Amino acid sequence: AKKSGGNRIQFYAAKMNEEMLYRLEMEGYLRKALEKQELFLCYQPIIDIHTGAIIGNEALIRWRHPQLGLVRPGEFIPLAEETGLIHDIGRWVLMTACKQTKEWQQLGNEHLSVFVNVSAMQFQHEQFIDDVKEALRQSQLSPHCLHLELTENSMLRHLSNSIQVMNELKQLGVGIAVDDFGSGYASFSYLKRLPATTLKIDRSFIEQLHTNQSDTAIVKAIITMGHGLGLKTIAEGVETVEQLELLKMLHCRYAQGYVLYPPLAAEELVGYMAARKK
Ligand code: C2E
Ligand code: CA
Ligand code: CA
Ligand code: CA
């Protein structure tokens, strides 16, 4: 037993070493990713359930590295936060998404919106409001077409600062969406104080929407509350026609998910938007 224990320790040590090296390597690569233009944005359409029209797109970051291949944001966004690289990356995402959306608007999609994910660290940084203003100024995008997505938990971190920043954004005319709504720790008293404009209903409630009665009840309650508070509601992760039909019956106005559109490269999306208009 002793012997195998020793082996195990060696094994763990080797594994830890491997992980540390991997992290260091990744960090080095990520530092270069921006200048080497390895980062790009995909866009996932958000539709009006009643008309099927694309009202906007969520910008989702991707990283294509020559050796690592395609790296998912779940893998490198946490690393970007730990290393502080998130500020440069986040600024780039904002600017790119605003400019791209303005371009699409000029092609005839006049009121097209864009939803941009913002990490807690980025949002709490004192420069954040200036970054948003700069992206709007350079892109000439109307602030009403920009929506920032924040999770409940990142809003609750440093609550009074969050409320202040959100109010400033609201005054600019920028929308604020609560991402993954229902999966975090926000209570009703927080929701009352947070100047959000949109609730994005977390995918976990949509998954078994038509088979699980609790999920149906929760989603129904979120939609009703959203209406009462004057908030838009977007259902995330809609994967089946049954889910979409049920959401329509529950008067959810907007939806996003694989059954409608997957995240698309900018070139692909422009074709869909053109096709819809014919
Ligand atoms: P999120 O903001 O909750 O984004 C939704 C995720 O669900 C995306 O994964 C999207 O591709 C995926 N998805 C969309 N429709 C469906 C569906 O019908 N079913 C299922 N199962 N999944 C669906 P993705 O692109 O891998 O992004 C993961 C997370 O990474 C995002 O979660 C967001 O938190 C973060 N992220 C993505 N882009 C950015 C960014 O530019 N900045 C920051 N700070 N975070 C980002
Ligand atoms: Ca999001
Ligand atoms: Ca989400
Ligand atoms: Ca999420």
Image (tube, rainbow, N blue to C red):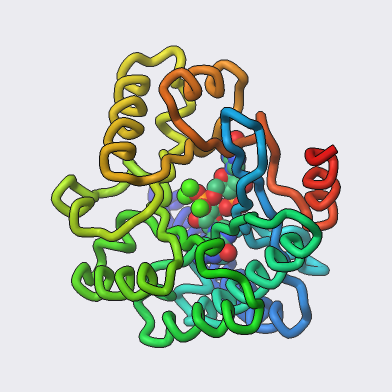
Occupied quadrant, residue 194 = bottom left
Q: Position of residue 229 (x, y in %)?
A: 27, 44
User: Residue at 27% of width from left, 36% of height from top?
Assistant: 225
- Left or right: 78 as drawn, with respect to 195: right
Using the rendered image of the protein, determine whether residue 74 is visible from the camera's viewpoint.
no
Occupied quadrant, residue 226 = top left
- Quadrant location of the C terminus in the rendered image: top right
Q: How many marks?
A: 0
Q: Is residue 44 above or below residue 73?
A: above
Q: Is residue 235 above or below residue 263?
A: above
Q: Is residue 152 above or below residue 102?
A: above
Q: Position of residue 221 (x, y in %)?
A: 28, 28
Occupied quadrant, residue 208 = top left
- Left or right: 224 as drawn, with respect to 204: left
- Quadrant location of the N terminus in the rendered image: top left
User: Residue at 78% of width from left, 54% of height from top?
Assistant: 265
- Left or right: 50 as drawn, with respect to 209: right
Query: Who is closer to the viewer here, 245 or 83?
Result: 245
User: Residue at 48% of width from left, 26% of height from top?
Assistant: 207
Using the rendered image of the protein, determine whether residue 39 is visible from the camera's viewpoint.
yes
User: Residue at 24% of width from left, 75% of height from top?
Assistant: 161
Q: Position of residue 188 (x, y in %)?
A: 17, 45
Q: Position of residue 25 (x, y in %)?
A: 64, 76
Q: Is residue 207 above or below residue 227?
A: above
Give the residue at the far left of this rendering: 189
- Left or right: 207 as drawn, with respect to 228: right
